[in-house]
Image (cartoon, helix red, strand yellow):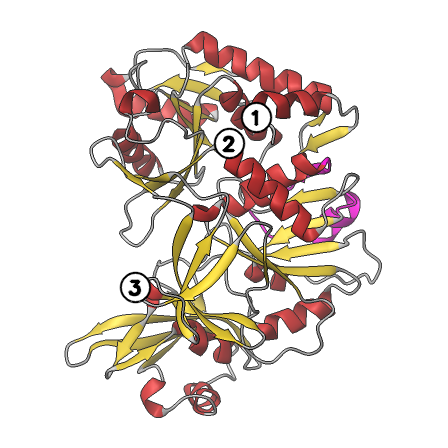
Amino acid sequence: MMNIKEFVRALSSREEIVISDRNRAFTGPEFVREIESVASCLIEIGVRRKSVVFLRTANTADCVATCLGILLCGGVVFVCNPYDPLDRLNSTIDRYLPYLIVSDNATAQAVRKLRGDNMHDAIRPLGTGSLNALCVGPRDSTLDERGGGMRDADVAIFSSGSTGQPKAILHSWENLFLNAVMHAESIGLVEGDRVGAVLPIYFSYGLVATVLSSLVAGATLVIYGQKDVVDESWIRDNHITVLGLTPYFARLLSLRERKTSLRVLTFGGDALFASAANEIKQNYPGCELYSTYGLTEAGPRVATYRFDNVTQMVPEVMPLGTPLSGVRCLVCDDRGNSVSGIGELVVETKTPMLGYYHGVKSGFESAGGNVIHTGDIFEERSDGLYFVGRKKDIIVQCGEKLFPIALESVIHRIDGVFDVRVDGIPDAERGEVAKAYIHASEHVTTTTIRRALLKQFSHASLPRYFEFVDSIPRSPTGKKTRSYPVARVG
């Protein structure tokens, strides 16, 4: 296990390019000099042990160097979404009271203007990159001072959770480093690989399973750095050998050339339907394909399932797969007892979060050990564990429990359907009913959808409402959001 200083020292021994993006490329010694330059600037500004530092984490080599620089000088990096609107960023600053915010110059200028009299320092450049630091809080704004079991925290990753209010999932460097090693081993990541960083770095899957896993394995990290979907030419021109995607983005990328540099593709962050997996197998011939499961609270990777060598899969989701080294996965009832059949997935891991930090006024909620209750419902079968749905997404319609993902998996398989989302909506008589939003070609009708669903579900289990839309809103990671779908025109 390497602490942050040992990790940075190890990077300095690599003479080859270790990280690059569209604008910059660093050898090991160059990258370490940049990390140390950032750390020196932060210390000069006043960052000390466990100072809270917000980092607007765009997909750039500068952001990776800055993240490591914050850790090197003893600060705690709060990984922020660079696409959050300014008013949301400002309210999050009020909630967590960081000492410093690090961002592009335009954001720093806007925050300074917005907060006015609260500002007490100039905008300062960091290292040789494009990022700037702005003091937004008191110098004693540290997790050490706040206590509450947070003193071991090094990284905070935001999650809105079920309330819509931001909460910071706190992790130690040691646990994130170990989880990155565990993930790299599970997919066979090796020195000499060129890992494509497409997923956002503020997303735990992107930060740990892509950025850290690449660096700990001795691979080269190549950052895509654009908001649009990665294309085949970028993979070819950069000789990418390993790529991690969400299932949604994977379906949008089809390799037309049979010969490709890719050897490993991983998929995570959302359920992978077997129908999509079969399509992916055809689109990525000759590649090792891994469906991965995880959650930020667990560090984040939990289990991996290799499916490129599996024969035609039945029409459902991928099984959980093999737990990573040192991880146990159990299906449990509401009292936490292991059961056969359907129940909540409970994960025992060596890399659990320290807990949830809800803000200065709301305090810290300790994780309380190595056991994580995922909130995901799985079914245990003879050949593995299968995802059924999220506890919070269960719809009770006419007294019957409906799992949106089960309905979505059937609708996804209909020819002409591009995307689908099933939500529970309030109903005056029934309390709640299911509504399906469907993005499909014109020939797909409600009758088409109902007929397909009736082959597997009873009438009582069908959505009560169907609406065809022009798109299903998705986040920069490709995950479905709670925004209202765009209605079909005409």
Q: Residue at x 69, y 61 (%)?
A: 289
Please tell me in which quadrant of the rendered image residue 11 appears: top right
Count of numbered labels shown in the rendering: 3
**Of 154 and 131, the residue lying toward us:** 154
Using the image, tell me which numbered label, if any, was put on residue 173.
Answer: 2
In the rendered structure, the answer to whether residue 21 lies left or right of residue 75 reads: right
> Answer yes or no: do the residues labelled 3 and 1 have beta carbons within 8 Å?
no
Q: Residue at x 60, y 75 (%)?
A: 275
Q: Secondary structure at mark 1?
A: loop
Residue 479 x %, y %: 47, 57
Return the disc, 3 or 1, that comes first in the chain's sequence. Answer: 1
Residue 444 x %, y %: 50, 83
> In which quadrant is the N terminus drawn?
top right
| Residue 215 in magenta stretch | no
**Of 8 and 163, the residue lying toward us:** 8
In the rendered structure, the answer to whether residue 134 lies left or right of residue 58 reads: left
> In which quadrant is the C terminus drawn?
bottom left
Q: Magenta residues, as a range?
A: 218-240
Please tell me in which quadrant of the rendered image residue 219 appears: top right
| Distance in Å between CA atoms under marks 3 and 1 | 38 Å
| Residue type indicated by callout 1 | Asn
Q: Residues within 10 Å of mark 2 (few under 14, many from 20)?
A: some
For discs 3 and 1, the disc positioned in front in the rendered view? 3
Q: Residue at x 51, y 51 (%)?
A: 477
> Answer yes or no: do the residues labelled 2 and 1 have beta carbons within 8 Å?
yes
Tell which residue pokes out farthest to the top in this image: 44
Q: Where is mark 1, residue-wise?
A: 3
| Distance in Å between CA atoms under marks 2 and 1 | 7 Å
Return the disc, 2 or 1, that comes first in the chain's sequence. Answer: 1
Using the image, tell me which numbered label, if any, was put on residue 105.
Answer: none
